[in-house]
Image: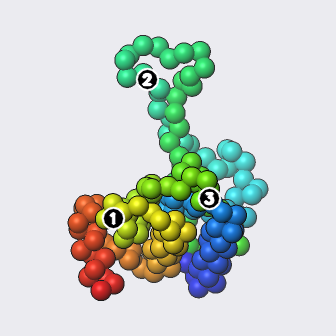
Amino acid sequence: MFPPDAARSTAAQLLLGLSYLHASGICHGDLHLRNFLLRTPAFYGLSTVELYKRFSEPFKVPIRRVDGKPGGPHAPPHGIYPMTLSMPANELDDLEVIISGYRTLFVVSQTPSLTLHTPALYAPPEDLFYEPITRPAAADIWTLGVNLYKVLGERPLIETFAWDRDDIIREMINTLG
């Protein structure tokens, strides 16, 4: 768990970031922990060699076409899995939180989305019931709240072994009434 000051700062930055998006008429539509990036001054001075020494080199995977043909001249030779930079929460000072994953965002006034891309455990109830998302800002706020509960608490708000929508709805009712 984060120390109390770091937890408050992290929550405040996420709330302010989402508030800014909504004030600009933008909904994210895919808020989850992998779309929250943490930047800490502990990394600012590290060279690539020092970063690899501390966390290991990234894992490279050769790119192969499904049909077995060679890739074109513009295709990369390999893909790189993202590094997981795990650090104890009490070592994370002066965090800067960045909301990422904007491929699913939409401008509310121009292209209201009927679906979200949020993982089911974080999704608002209307999405779990396959209802249109008529209030996308409210859906983003629900999703952020579920994420904050997990970040600031000791466990997720909704827990289930399967990501089955019926199980998630049942757990949501058991948890919230």
- Residue nearest the viewer, comparing 103 with 127: 127
Is label 2 in a helix, a strand or a loop? loop
Looking at the image, which residue is at 69% across and 69% down? 23
Mark identifier at residue 152: none
Tell me residue 160's x, y (percent).
27, 69
Where 147 sits versus 68, above or below? below
Of labels 3 and 2, earlier in sequence is 2
Q: Is residue 31 left or right of residue 41?
A: left
Q: Amino acid at mark 3?
A: Ser
Q: Which residue is mark 1?
A: 128
The residue that mark 2 highlights is: 64
Q: Where does the image place residue 37, in percent across and percent down from the top left?
A: 60, 60
Q: Are marks 1 and 2 in contact (CB under 8 Å)?
A: no
How many C-alpha atoms fall within 10 Å of the one at disc 3: few (<14), some, or many (≥20)?
few
Q: Which image quadrant: the C terminus?
A: bottom left
Quick check: 171 above or below 39? below
Q: CA distance from mark 1 to mark 2?
A: 36 Å
- Check disc 3 and report its element: helix, strand or loop: loop
Quarter of the image for residue 106 reads bottom right
Give the x, y percent position of residue 63.
Answer: 47, 26
The three-letter code of the residue at mark 1 reads: Leu
In the picture, measured across the screen, residue 114 lies left or right of residue 16, that is left
Q: Which residue is mark 3?
A: 109
> Which amino acid type is shown beneath numbered disc 2?
Arg
Mark closer to the chain start, 1 or 3:
3
For discs 1 and 3, the disc positioned in front in the rendered view: 3
Q: Residues within 10 Å of mark 1 (few under 14, many from 20)?
A: some
Q: Along the line of sight, which residue is nearer the eye, 40 or 28?
A: 28
In front here: 152 or 23?
A: 23
- Tell me how far mark 3 sits from mark 2, CA to CA: 41 Å
